[in-house]
Image: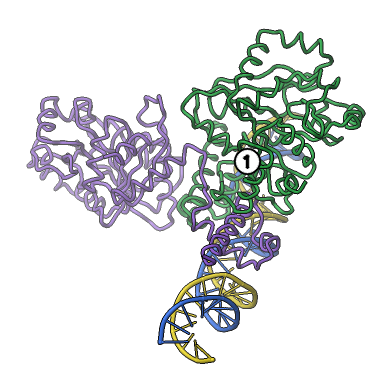
Chain colours: A purple, B green, C yellow, D blue
Amino acid sequence: MARKLESQGRLDDAARAGWLYYVAGRTQDEIAISMGISRQSAQRLVSLAVAERLIKVRLDHPIAACLEYAVALREKFKLRHVEVVPSDPDGTSSTVGIAEAGAAEIERWLKRSDPIVLAIGTGRTLKAAVDQLPAIECPQHRVVSLTGNIGPDGSAAYYNVIFSMADAIKARHYPMPLPVLVSSAEERELLHAQALVRSTLDISAQADVTFVGVGEMGIEAPLCLDGFLEKDEMMALMRRGAAGEICGWVFDGDGKLMSDAVNDRVASAPIPPREASSVIGIAKGKRKFEAIKAAVTGHQINGLITDEAVAEFLLKG
Amino acid sequence: MARKLESQGRLDDAARAGWLYYVAGRTQDEIAISMGISRQSAQRLVSLAVAERLIKVRLDHPIAACLEYAVALREKFKLRHVEVVPSDPDGTSSTVGIAEAGAAEIERWLKRSDPIVLAIGTGRTLKAAVDQLPAIECPQHRVVSLTGNIGPDGSAAYYNVIFSMADAIKARHYPMPLPVLVSSAEERELLHAQALVRSTLDISAQADVTFVGVGEMGIEAPLCLDGFLEKDEMMALMRRGAAGEICGWVFDGDGKLMSDAVNDRVASAPIPPREASSVIGIAKGKRKFEAIKAAVTGHQINGLITDEAVAEFLLKG
DNA sequence: TTTGCTCATGGGCAATTACTCATAGTTCAT
DNA sequence: ATGAACTATGAGTAATTGCCCATGAGCAAA
């Protein structure tokens, strides 16, 4: 009884100390004096108030929700790095917000003074992110492309990510003079045997960090729009369970790379190992929901930069 | 890049840093590393988040002493709702603590799903409370001002409570384009006859809950500081027995509205009926002792949010 | 009464945070 | 272009806080 009252009184004191500290903004010394206790006791009361969750802190800013999503996603999918940007309610652009966040993350890596190998995929989102990079000279790093920069018609690349990037940061760069998809597995072997391509592939395998887009399936998918896949090929792929692709590598709903004729024709470098390096996907948008979910589920990527809408979807299931 | 965007981004960063510091409990060093900035910059962002009121702290614990005071006050003055916050021993601010408590109570009403009419007075304390409100959308409610928002010199309001509030909660709002005091009873009638003012008055009479400040008498009183009353008018009022005012309505030591020339000039809406609705006063401080006592004694208010010092005073007499 | 346990306390110290100051970069008016 | 005014930055330092530990009070069981 007395014990109970005592500890009740202690909680009251904790509440009072916590109030004086967090709400009134007094120092623990002042609190100690006004409550007639030692500073250490005041400190204990304040931390007790926190431990007992008497003190509720909340952040009144759109960012708050994003940060909470990020923590939850990192936990749920065992990711190394997650960034969630606020969704633009009526934004139609698929790159606004996310591009800036992607650029900021790329920049963080570039600012390192020790030399790193940075691998880059392709796609509209990635291009938008790279376009946000400021001109910072990083001659110590190397940038390597995972995917070819040749269009299906033999023309130069659509989303010329690596050249834009190298231009901005003045680093050595290793493009891949191939299309994303070639006509057969045999052709791929032939092309990959070329010395130039060979060295690019070797470097890509050493990547410290990789940034890739995540492509969805469907007749509006990048692979179709850019002419690498015909509509009927795409439909067939989807019937076989394809959920999305990264650098052309098609995976199913569990995020497993498919044993499929299409994957045999992918000329891109393999996605660098997720165990040893950071592979960060940059993607958002309703159309990519399933593709992103599959990618994180199957650990095709171990980092994700996305928006609130995607985060909600991923946490819901 | 636009300056606007820059400072927006800075607030975002501040929010992020504040969240990491207060909610996630990281040190400023860790935050600095993860955001790629110096420790000092991280510290600045955290304090910016506090300064910009992005961080809201509240104490979720009825401190025994305060709770006892509250019960005793509710009993003694037949009040519907009493809240007592701890006094800050040597705090000079007249709003610290009470503003958060006021905001929490306002929030409780706003969270109701059935539409209500919420009436609001004016004053520094009320403004401080409203500034603590988070952004919650309550389009079902209506907010009406009891007092004018025009200064004695014709300028816009001093403590623009209702606009701040409407801004935070996105509800329909009905301000009153009048000064607190006009020159004569006749002018008041004339102004009150205007259609716009008329409808605001009608709505205010239907208020489900009302939040008001309690003003004291004296040459330091709000009415004087804000220029509505000259010093000699105030002195005369006090000689005639004035003890305090709510929305400009002056009452005596028993809390009875005075039959006085000054009250004939008050352009505010009448205080909504205490029998049918909650009228909650928010006030603390030694200078307001007598005014608050009169207000609760005469049932000008039937709810009170105040601090320990006032509670002790009210219970002593 | 003794023993053994729990727990609050205050001292001391290391970690963390707040603040001041000098400097470098920017803006803006001349 | 030039310089004043302003702002952000990093270093350095003082203030504040967090934590470990030895101590002793309170209390229940032996």
Label 1, residues with CA under 10 Å away: few <14, some 14-19, many ≥20: many
Check the image and report above or below for A151 versus A166.
above
Q: Amino acid at mark 1?
A: Val
Whole-percent x, y for residue A55 in the image: 53, 51
In front of the other: A231 or A32: A32
Q: Nearer the viewer, residue A197 or B294?
A: B294
Q: Position of residue B54 (x, y in %)?
A: 56, 41
Q: Nearer the viewer, residue A192 or A204?
A: A204
Q: Position of residue A157 (x, y in %)?
A: 26, 32
Helix, strand or loop status at disc 1: strand
How many marks are shown on the rendered structure? Answer: 1
Disc 1 marks which residue?
Answer: B82
Quarter assignment of residue A149? top left
Q: Quadrant of residue B179?
A: top right
Q: Position of residue A99 (x, y in %)?
A: 39, 36
Q: Is residue A243 left or right of residue C3?
A: left
- Residue A251 lies in quadrant: top left
What chain does badge 1 belong to? Answer: B
In the rendered structure, the answer to whether residue B30 lies left or right of residue C19 reads left
Residue A184's place in the image compared with B34, above or below, is above
Which residue occupies 60% across, 23% down? B207
